[in-house]
Amino acid sequence: MLNRRTLLGAAGAGALLATTGIARAQDKLYIPLISKGFQHQFWQAVKAGADKAATEFGVDVTFEGPDTEAQVDKQMAMLAAALAKKPAAIGFAALDSQAAIPLLKQAQEAGIPIIAFDSGVDSDIPATTVTTDNLAAAAFAADKMAELIGGAGKVALVVHDQTSRTGIDRRDGFVNRVKEAYPNIEIVDIQYGAGDQLQSTEITKAILTAHPDLKGFFGANEGSAIGVLNGVKESGATGITVIGYDSGKLQKDAIRWAKWRVPSRKTRSASAMKPSRRPSPPSKAKSCRPRSTPASPGTTRPTSTPRKSWPFSTIDLIYKTSGPGFPGPVS
């Protein structure tokens, strides 16, 4: 099944192939793709798209990236090594929108086309950039946050970095939309967790300690969003709205759980405070509502509030925590 991430890889590889011209069938073109990492399912899907395009056009495509999205120096070393092999073209997703420019100038001087994908650079050297409109997507996230918290309250951001175009644009898209449209929403903190789940978890717990009346979080990539979910769970906070970017399996699992069971805070009784057994995922032919179980004598059953199912498109995680019923932490 093709999705946004797979199509991003295929489109990036396709742009590279168009740039090189695929001139001679007897000479198999070599095109390295330097990504921001492998640690998230997003990059695995991008690789799948690139591999699909390579097979279709009969070229040799490699895909590599650093262990974490904090390793800018390692990514620069990979880019330099790719240049030394004199490839037909290079696909590049920059961890730092400025750091790679000297190497990209070398590529330009050598006549090697550069196609930026996912995260561009602050330069006109790339022939084109294949990416999501991160500013618009993050603004959409802000609109949904406002809708879910009633247009007022304190929110915080956990962003993967402040050096890549994705980190900068997703932060600014969210912040600017809140400033221009929602005067009663206060952004109390913006922290950076390098897209690392553990680091983002600790950041989330620290923010909740400093702001116990917080209403919502925006996690700006897969690792940030999962870290926020874990941090909210580990802190014991309830009633927190979490909106995240990307659509890894753990994120989609959280959405499915939220759709099945979100106890009402007003009707939650003493018995409802005990951890409950997580329902099994329903089949496609069945309702997404969990099967009911008899309530204990003398207790009040917590009601379930249906969650609207948002499409997994540019913003792929909308989740509202529900206290002890929340399964986790996710890892």
Image: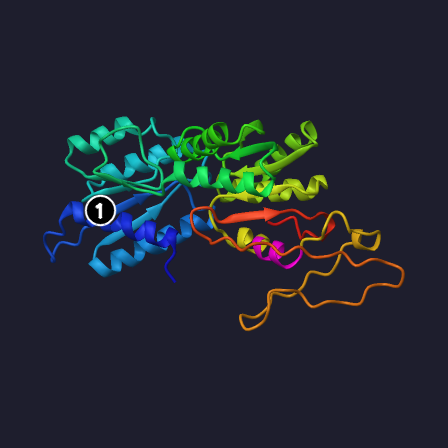
Side of 161 relative to 79 (left or right): right
Instruction: Indicate the quadrant where residue 145 lies.
Output: top right
| 226 vs 141, nearest the viewer | 141
Residue at image coords 58%, 43%? 148
Residue at image coords 40%, 39%? 136
Q: Secondary structure at mark 1?
A: helix
Other-residue count near label 1 (Cα within 10 Å), few / some / many at <14 / 14–19 / ≥20: many
Prevailing SS of the magenta stretch:
helix
Residue 196 percent coordinates (x, y)? 53, 39
Q: Which residues are magenta?
A: 255-261
- Indicate whether residue 24 is drawn in magenta: no
Instruction: Indicate the quadrant where residue 198 lies.
Output: top right
Residue 149 percent coordinates (x, y)? 61, 40
Q: Could you tell me the amino acid type at mark 1? A: Leu
Residue at image coords 55%, 29%? 191
| Tally of numbered tags | 1
Residue 288 percent coordinates (x, y)? 60, 65
